[in-house]
Image: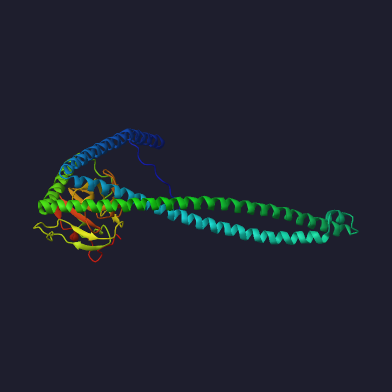
């Protein structure tokens, strides 16, 4: 049976080809019209982002002036911990470069060994060919021409001779190429070794600088503690630090009102309760709601004890709203997750993200430290909703305490 396709009724009498062209024209026109709109939206978001960054920079300067006016030791601590953070970043970059240089040297040495073995093999073959030529005596081709041989044997031997002669020439060329490759590799090894030695010297200088800064920091913290004990201001400092943080969060909330909306395909942060991975692998040292030493104030977050330099990761999608030093919390990162949810990461050694940058779950944002005048390294972590602290422990995966590694 042969099936035929019946044409679709066309009430206005248009030909199918004409209809297709008309639809295509409409699509193209719509696409071209949407292009400038999308570009305008992107431009508008970029302007909003720059405005956000300017406001945050202004806020940071205001905070610095306010904090510096209270104590010269606070000013010194902020500057020295900022310097330590930058030097630590340089040290990690240098160590990474050293690792790459070592890998490069290992690869080059393997390449050199391969070329050397190839040269040994080629030399052995060439030596055999030279010995064979020597046994035939000088001018072996002329001797072959004047030999009393059967013409057929003579032609075959001449072909063989030409083959071996060409092979010998090619082998000599290969030997020369292998020698050239070995010399080139040796030169590259020399340059890589020199660069590696320079990296080691740089690392040594950076570590000396870090050690000196660490001693300065220790002296500043000692002077600050003496000042507090003399003035009986330990409790006042804790109260002031809490007020300072709350003031910062209130200011950030106001700034974020006009900020561009996230472009990430993200889940609503409120739905992540009980599903988040922990920001760093370590041991809980302070729990939410516990009393702070020598005061009736309670912890509004948690402290996770971890080694200096260990990577800290963002717990969810969001935008960095603040990345700077704050009295009491040291090098601090605050991430806006939308719907008035914020996550806070304090006492960092180094900060790897800047205000306005987008982050995804598991992105490395900082490294564990003891900034803010702490004695032991660890991460201070909070979750806030409309400025009010939440119990972070209830937001993380059960039985998977430090899944983020």
- Residue 236 vs residue 387, the one in the foreground: 236
Q: Can residue 120 be seen in this view?
A: yes
Q: Position of residue 133 (x, y in %)?
A: 79, 59
> Could you say where residue 91 lies in the image, as x and y percent from the top left?
36, 52
Instruction: Tell how many labels.
Output: 0
Of 330 and 167, which appears nearest the observer? 330
Taking the image as shown, residue 380 lies to the left or right of residue 310, namely: left
Residue 403 appears at what percent x and percent y?
28, 62
Residue at horizontal 43 percent and vertical 56 percent from the top: 99
Q: Quadrant of residue 28?
A: top left
Q: Is residue 296 left or right of residue 204?
A: left
Q: Which of 319 and 151 is in front in this view?
A: 319
Question: In this orientation, does residue 268 appear?
Answer: no
Q: Is residue 243 shown left or right of residue 200?
A: left
Residue farthest along the right direction in this orientation? 148
Determine the residue located farthest toward the left in the rendered image. Answer: 296
- The x and y percentages for residue 294 are 11, 59
Q: Which colour scheme is used?
A: rainbow
Image side of residue 107 versus residue 372, left or right: right
Q: In this view, does 203 lie above or below 55?
A: below
Residue drawn at x 47%, y 50% as measured from the top left: 195
Query: Which quarter shows the C terminus?
Result: bottom left
């Amino acid at each position: 049976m042969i099936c035929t396709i019946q044409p679709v009724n066309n009430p206005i009498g248009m030909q199918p080809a004409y209809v297709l062209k008309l639809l295509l024209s409409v699509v193209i026109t719509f696409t071209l019209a949407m292009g400038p709109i999308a570009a305008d939206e992107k431009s508008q978001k970029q302007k909003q982002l720059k405005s956000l960054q300017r406001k945050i920079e202004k806020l940071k300067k205001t905070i610095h002036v306010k904090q510096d006016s209270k104590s010269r030791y606070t000013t010194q601590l902020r500057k020295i911990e900022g310097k330590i953070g930058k030097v630590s970043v340089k040290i990690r970059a240098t160590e990474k470069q050293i690792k790459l240089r070592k890998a490069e040297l290992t690869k080059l040495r393997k390449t050199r060994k391969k070329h050397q073995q190839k040269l040994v093999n080629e030399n052995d073959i060439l030596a055999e060919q030279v010995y064979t030529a020597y046994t035939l005596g000088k001018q072996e081709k002329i001797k072959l021409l004047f030999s009393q041989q059967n013409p057929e044997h003579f032609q075959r031997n001449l072909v063989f001779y030409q083959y071996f002669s060409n092979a010998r020439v090619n082998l000599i060329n290969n030997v020369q190429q292998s020698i050239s490759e070995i010399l080139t590799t040796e030169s590259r090894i020399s340059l890589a070794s020199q660069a590696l030695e320079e990296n080691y010297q740089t690392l040594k200088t950076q570590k000396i600088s870090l050690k000196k800064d660490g001693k300065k920091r220790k002296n500043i913290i000692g002077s600050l503690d003496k000042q507090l004990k003399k003035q009986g201001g330990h409790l006042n400092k804790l109260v002031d630090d809490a007020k300072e943080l709350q003031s910062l969060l209130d200011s950030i909330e106001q700034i974020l009102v006009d900020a561009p909306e996230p472009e990430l395909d993200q889940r609503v942060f409120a739905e992540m309760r009980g599903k988040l991975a922990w920001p760093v692998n370590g041991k809980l040292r302070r729990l939410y709601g516990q009393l702070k030493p020598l005061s009736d104030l309670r912890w509004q977050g948690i402290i996770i004890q971890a080694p200096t330099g260990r990577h800290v990761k963002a717990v969810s999608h969001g935008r960095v709203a603040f990345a700077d030093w704050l009295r009491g919390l040291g090098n601090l990162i605050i991430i806006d997750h939308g719907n008035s949810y914020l996550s806070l990461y304090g006492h960092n050694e180094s900060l790897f993200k800047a205000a306005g940058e987008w982050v995804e779950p598991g992105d490395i944002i900082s490294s564990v430290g003891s900034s803010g005048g702490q004695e032991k390294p660890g991460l201070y972590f909070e979750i806030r909703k409309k400025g009010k602290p939440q119990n972070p422990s209830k937001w993380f995966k059960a039985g998977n305490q430090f899944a983020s590694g």
